Amino acid sequence: MIEIFILSIVQGITEFLPISSSSHLILISKYISFNNQGLSVDVSLHIGSFLAVIVYFKKDVFNFIKNKDLFFKIILSSLPVMLVGFVLVRLDLVNQFRNIQVIGWTTIIFGILLFISDKMKVSKKIEKNFSLKSAIFIGSLQILSLMPGVSRSGIAISASRFLKFSRYDSAKISFLISIPILAAVSLFGLNNLITSENLDFSLLNLISIFLSFIFSYITIKFFLKYLQKFSLNIFVIYRLILGIILLVISYL
């Protein structure tokens, strides 16, 4: 139960903040052995995050019916990382660079990129300026998040800030794009469970979904409120410190 609680915190927080989930999982797993971290639990955690972002942005989701243009751009932004990710999984290359040295360096490098992007002046808004070119640019850069340590939300926010969207709008774009991505990850995981004849949802899975939903929802709400008043510097500093710790551990 404690393992599920820890995994739910890691999933809920790192899925939406511009920090890397893989960095944290490696650091935590170095000291804690997760006996319950099977595919069904992993799927449950992603379902919880998916439901959280759907509930939080329910007005925007319902507006997709009226605003089909925005819906198309959100789907377009999510396609590159999903398609490339699918190919990497099929070719068994998804864990090719999943080592602590690579994650340490990418955590630092993309932390610096986040810092640089956050210095851009604000001149655009989602309602008026989230164009087809913006969607393609953000979507293309998200492919980099397939490299461990980069952070999908981090690179999406950085890309949006480079396009001169506000911190709040950049985070919102990242969250909206996460909806189809989380849906795809959840469905892909469920399909693997079904094909392996291992679809056995238990109370543990329901608890995983619930806890992941709670931590994800709280994180989304906190982060958006935070960005209305403060910069992304705290996350940059955090990434630099975490990256250095990972590199020190890797070379010891």
Image (tube, rainbow, N blue to C red):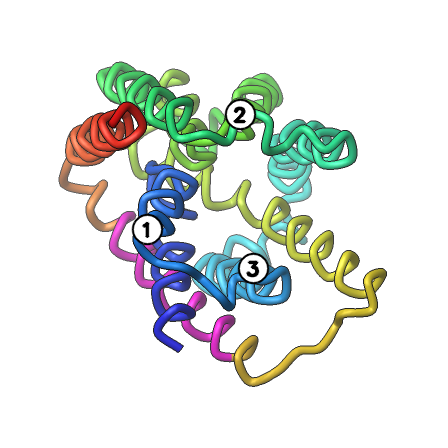
Give the camera-side residue of 28 and 126. 28
| Residue farthest along the front direction in this orientation | 252
Q: Secondary structure at mark 2?
A: loop
> Which residue is painted at 14% across and 37% down in the image?
230
The boundaries of the magenta stretch are 207-224
Residue 143 to residue 208: above or below: above
Q: Which residue is mark 2?
A: 97
| Residue farthest along the bottom direction in this orientation | 203
In this rendering, which labeled residue sits more in front, label 3 or label 1? 1
Q: Secondary structure at mark 3?
A: helix
The residues bearing labels 2 and 3 have C-alpha atoms spaced at a distance of 20 Å
Q: Amino acid at mark 3?
A: Asp
Q: Secondary structure at mark 1?
A: helix
| Picture coordinates of residue 81, whole percent (x, y) | 63, 31
Residue 59 to residue 146: above or below: below
Badge 2, how many Cα within 10 Å: few under 14, some, many 20+?
Answer: some
Main secondary structure type of the part rendered in magenta: helix
| Picture coordinates of residue 202, whole percent (x, y) | 61, 82
Q: Which residue is mark 3?
A: 42
The residues bearing labels 3 and 1 have C-alpha atoms spaced at a distance of 16 Å
In this rendering, which labeled residue sits more in front, label 2 or label 3? 2
| Picture coordinates of residue 126, whole percent (x, y) | 45, 33
> Which residue is painted at 53% across and 79% down in the image?
204
Q: Which residue is mark 1?
A: 28
